[in-house]
Image (cartoon, rainbow, N blue to C red):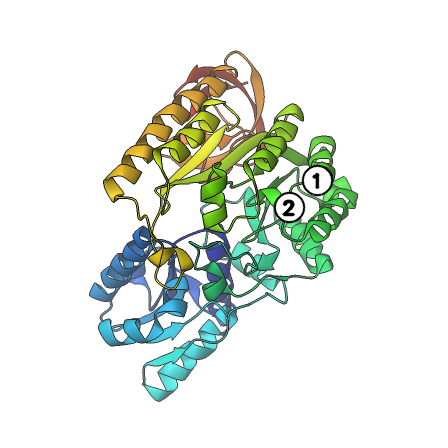
Amino acid sequence: MKVSIMNLGCPKNQKDGEQALSCFIKKGFSYEKDPRRSDVIIVNTCSFIDDAKKESIAVILECASIKKKKVLLIMGCLSQRYPEEIMKDIPEADVILGTGNVDKAYDLYIEFINNKKRLIDVCAPGFIQSDNSYIKTLKNSAYIPETQTSSSYVKVAEGCSNRCTYCVIPSIRGTAVYRPKEQVLEEIKALKRVGVKETILIAQDLSSNKKYLKDLLKGICSIKSSERPDWVRLMYCNPWGVDSELISIIKNEDCIVKYIDMPIQHISDDVLKRMGRASSASSIYKKLDQLKNSGIFIRSTVMTGFPGEKASDFNELKKLVKASYFHWLGIFVYSPQEGTPSYNMKGQVAYNIATERRNELDTIQFDITSSFNETYLGKTLKVLLCGKEDRSKIGRIFSQAPSVDGLVRLTGSLKKEDGFVNVLITENLGYDIKGKIV
């Protein structure tokens, strides 16, 4: 028997998908990349914004069209949010489960097989994995995550206790709950044993519990070098959780890459207040200056078109982007989500205006990112190998996170398939850079 999985959405969702997949492999299933050749298809959905919902529905329908005698299992954020609608509108869906019971995927499949009856099992959110056996299970299968085998995400918490007025995550994932630090450390060591060179710490808000995160990082840094990853990367740290002590840890610990993902969403105090964000413009500028002065590369996220965003608000945001704090920047158009406070707010901004603002920022940021990449020319950098793309060898330097940032496109011969190589950077490709293995 074969099982395939279609993982959509964020890395946090991907980790849930890997938990579900490992349940099947432990029971004797083999992993099959092509869903057309599998017996069970898992679609792990996203529902954060409208585009994500549309993509999830499109993938479900595509898998439904090739189903034949296969079992179709739908999981993730979309099924947590709209289980009855999926059951009604997609009759090909056999099993629907939510975000709170991803470890029950195989058991629900067996229940369906035994009873020959479609089923929904969506419980309260807040799933926290209790063991790390999935690591060895997936390593011994044919499954390869999108980060390839050199890197791995480690989810340290589930849910979010922030109440940003545009966000559905707390209703889909629950309030923030944290894994025991000892369990996270054991997972990191287990990943090292199977060859992982980079650990990427993730959560809906990684820095919301400042003491937890700093204690965890100190714990990681205290692991002897042969048992810990070469790189530790921090993703999704909101500004109010980033303080001087955390910045000092990132700056001074060798195994932590000098990089942080710190989403700010906006810089106008009026917009930040309506968003329900716990930061002011002055506090954000202070954190950005501290990070920049500490030599830490910054990725961030901003949003255009939030209800009530005036031209003057956007100009404040544009001024910030032009200041070149961000090496990488995700720019999103506000997507109104039913059930959130912002959905019925006054002052909804026309989509075409929000899109024009997004495109203007994107043009500014492209030039800034390209300028940063220009500084690498002629330098020899440490590059983590990441497989191939379009038949060419690729890798990443410390300032490039997987999937969201640029790549290093490699020329020259390789003596190994994974790990680190030294690369002489020869060309700036805009978002990507090119170099020769030396």
Q: Secondary structure at mark 1?
A: helix
Quarter holding the C terminus is: top right
Mark number, residue 241: 2
Mark number, residue 89: none
The residues tagged by marks 2 and 1 sit, at their Cα atoms, a distance apart of 9 Å
Quarter holding the N terminus is: bottom left
Amino acid at the residue labelled 1: Leu
Q: Residue furthest left?
A: 65
Tell me if residue 309 can be seen. yes
| Camera-nearest residue between 42 and 157 | 157
Q: Position of residue 31 (x, y in %)?
A: 42, 60
Q: Residue furthest bottom?
A: 115
Q: Secondary structure at mark 2?
A: helix
Q: Position of residue 300 (x, y in %)?
A: 50, 37
Q: Residue at x 32, y 57 (%)?
A: 53
Q: Earlier in the sequence, mark 2 or mark 1?
A: 2
**Marks 2,1: beta carbons within 8 A:** yes
Q: Residue at x 27, y 60 (%)?
A: 57
Tell me if residue 197 can be seen. no
Q: Position of residue 361 (x, y in %)?
A: 37, 29
Which residue position holds label 1? Answer: 246
How packed mark 1 is, by other alpha carbons closer than 10 Å (few <14, some 14-19, many 20 or more), is some
Q: Position of residue 99 (x, y in %)?
A: 47, 67
Q: Residue at x 75, y 40 (%)?
A: 225
How packed mark 2 is, by other alpha carbons closer than 10 Å (few <14, some 14-19, many 20 or more), is some
**Is residue 57 placed above or below 201 in the rendered structure?**
below
Amino acid at the residue labelled 2: Gly
